[in-house]
Every structure is written in C-alpha cells, then in structure tokens.
Image: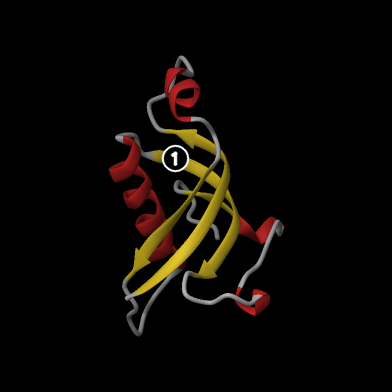
Amino acid sequence: MIQVYVELTNIVWEDDKDGSIAYEQGSNRSFVVDIILTDYLHSDDIDSAIADTLETASGHRPKSWDLDVFENHRMTHTNNRFRNSPKNSCNLTNNKL
C-alpha cells in the first residue's frame, strides 16, 4: 500500500440535484489516500480509492473531479507529481485519469 497526496478541484457530488452538497462540502479538496498496490493496478482502482476516501471523510460520494496533484505522500521533491494536465480529469462514469 502507498499513501498518495491528492488535490481535487471541480468536484461534482452524486445526488446533488439542488446544489446543497456542493454548498456544504465545497468543490475543492486535498487529502491523503491509501492505494493498494497490485500487479494489475488500473485507473479504476485509483478512482475508487479516491472516491471511497472522500465519501468516508465527507459522507457524500463524488461523481467527478479534476485531479490537480497526485504525488507519493512520503516524497518531498517534485519529480513524482503532476499538475493541471487535461489527462488528470476524472469522471467516475467513464473512469478517465
């Protein structure tokens, strides 16, 4: 297992038809997520770990988000991070990372 620091922006919450969850929870978050390493780790696994962690912390599940930072939590240099790339956008309905 590794711990990864993530920064999310533009979070869209599931079942937020009237915008009350977004108002209460906001649309930006930064936190550490535990990701179980396997030989067959896919972006779906990372998406699920991020969504599960955020749901546990907030009580609400995110539907989509933009991933602005994804870095090994124990690393202090910037070689293991990426920022603000179009490829970093995530939507759980199509599992893009």
**Quadrant position of the C terminus in the picture:** bottom right
Task: Tell me residue 44's x, y (percent).
Answer: 41, 62
Amino acid tagged 1 = Lys
At 48% from the left edge and 26% from the top edge, which residue is drawn? 22
**Quadrant position of the N terminus in the picture:** bottom left
Residue sticking out furthest to the front: 76
Residue sticking out furthest to the top: 18
Mark 1, residues whose alpha carbon is within 10 Å: few (<14), some, or many (≥20)? some
At 55% from the left edge and 52% from the top edge, which residue is drawn? 7
Task: Tell me residue 30's x, y (percent).
Answer: 51, 49
Task: Tell me residue 64's x, y (percent).
Answer: 50, 43
Does 57 sit left or right of 8 as displayed?
Answer: left
Label 1 residue SS? strand
Compared with 25, 90 (above or below) is: below
Residue denoted by label 1? 63
Residue sticking out furthest to the bottom: 39
How many badges with numbers are in the image? 1
In front here: 58 or 37?
58
At 31% from the left edge and 72% from the top edge, which residue is drawn? 36
Task: Tell me residue 84's x, y (percent).
Answer: 70, 56
Compared with 46, 60 (above or below) is: above
Residue sticking out furthest to the right: 85
Compared with 70, 19 (above or below) is: above
- Describe the colour scheme in one phrase: secondary structure
At 38% from the left edge and 49% from the top edge, which residue is drawn? 51
In front here: 69 or 13?
69
In front here: 61 or 80?
80
